[in-house]
Image (cartoon, rainbow, N blue to C red):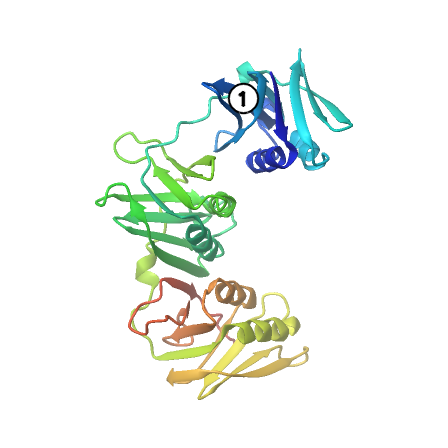
Amino acid sequence: MKFRVERDVLADAVAWTARSLPVRPSVPVLAGMLLDASDNEGRQRLRLSSFDYEVSAQVSVDIEVEEPGTCLVSGRLLAEITRNLPPQTVEIATDGAKVTVSCGSAKFTLLTLPVEDYPTLPEMPGQTGSIGSDVFAAAVAQVAVAAGRDDTLPMLTGVRVEIEGSTLTLASTDRYRLAVREITWSPENPDVSAVALVPAKTLADTAKSLTSGAEVSIALATGEGAEGMIGFEGGGRRTTTRLLDGEFPKYRALLPDSFNSVAEINKAEFIEAVKRVSLVAERNTPLRLAFGEGRLVLEAGTGDEAQAVEVLDASMEGEEIQIAFNSSYLLDGLGAVDSDIARLQFTTSTKPAIISGKPADETAASDYRYLIMPVRLSG
């Protein structure tokens, strides 16, 4: 195998493929990255692949091929090397059981891993539909903040992806908060109906990394005997991941359909005030919010502890309310709102509140909702 490629093109492709490499591979060969240089009818391409039996990643780039071939090398080492090469043309060639990487005056020699021991990457399922890559990345980021991080409850570490015709719904919860986002997308079949539970970290990393292309194709294996897998493709990159097992909570029943009070407040000012006031809050002590006519009072700390109070302008409809939240959960929800005005809807001080953005059209429901459980105040 021997080929040439521009440093930036190679470094970008290698870095993206290396994201999926396991930190502690169960077998040494899974630490490898597969390089396949081909020349098919004048189309000279390098395909880079990684796979750990859970997540696969594959990207193709244009190269100049002198000798087609395949090799397997340490993915992390190759990523470190390509990232630090000078900005010139890179030449990669195999020499027996070694691979040489030459660029300018720099030359590296890497040992190869046995290609025949490397597992076959899973096939992409048939395409289910497509969506704008920026819209998808923003929606996933809004929802992934509420996913659990406790691996003993794997069903809570995922994002539930619901496909119903042209509506794609994303939802996640860690039992203390719940995030739901609805987006319109382009299904291959207008009558499609499917559900998948995708690991939240994998989904967030993937959505963010596929914005180099205008669209992301989503491929979900559905129907009888379907493999528990979902695939994403865009900008010459494709990745697959195994789905999580387990029953996701029936979250729609948790979303209140009526409220006793609604407050609206400048989001940026609210975030800054929460950060300031919570400086004095001991770990796990709540931030107290009192919404009244025209204003919001934020407080933290009690008694002999350090205390902080701040007052902000806020519009209020309905009953006045005093409620307390975990400040980091509150900040996550406010940070995910894609509007300058944050809207908070309450029933009572002991029931969940909903954070959303103020919709441009007052008659429309918000397409993003962040439900947050209040903290009960003693006394």
Pinpoint residue 194: horizontal percent, then vertical percent: 29, 43
Q: Quadrant of residue 126?
A: top left
Which of the 4 image quadrants contains residue 351? bottom left
Q: Residue at x 60, y 27 (%)?
A: 31
Quarter that holds the N terminus = top right
Residue 298 drawn above or below residue 195: below
Furthest residue to the right? Answer: 105
Residue 336: x and y in percent read 48, 62
Position of residue 286 measured from the top left corner of the image (x, y, whole percent): 55, 71
Q: Is residue 273 left or right of residue 131?
A: right
Q: Secondary structure at mark 1?
A: strand
Extreme residue in the left direction: 191
Total labels: the figure holds 1
- Is residue 371 shown left or right of residue 152? left
Residue positioned 54% across, 75% down in the render: 270
Given residues 349 and 279, the one toward you in this image is 279
In screen coordinates, is 41 left or right of 71? left
Q: Is residue 266 visible?
A: yes
Q: Three-letter amino acid code at disc 1?
A: Asp
Mark 1, Cα crowd under 10 Å, few <14 / some 14-19 / many 20+, is some
Which one is nearer the viewer's eye here, 342 or 257? 342
Residue 298, compared with residue 208, is above or below; it is below
Give the percent coordinates (x, y) of residue 272: 59, 73
Residue 75 appears in the figure:
no
Which residue is outermost to the bottom? 293
Q: Looking at the image, is 304 positioned above or below residue 71?
A: below
Residue at the extreme front: 42
Instruction: Out of 298 and 82, give the one closest to the viewer.
Output: 82
Instruction: Say which quarter of the image contains residue 127.
Output: top left
* Residue that numbered label 1 is attached to: 36
Residue under the image location 48 percent in, 47 percent down? 211
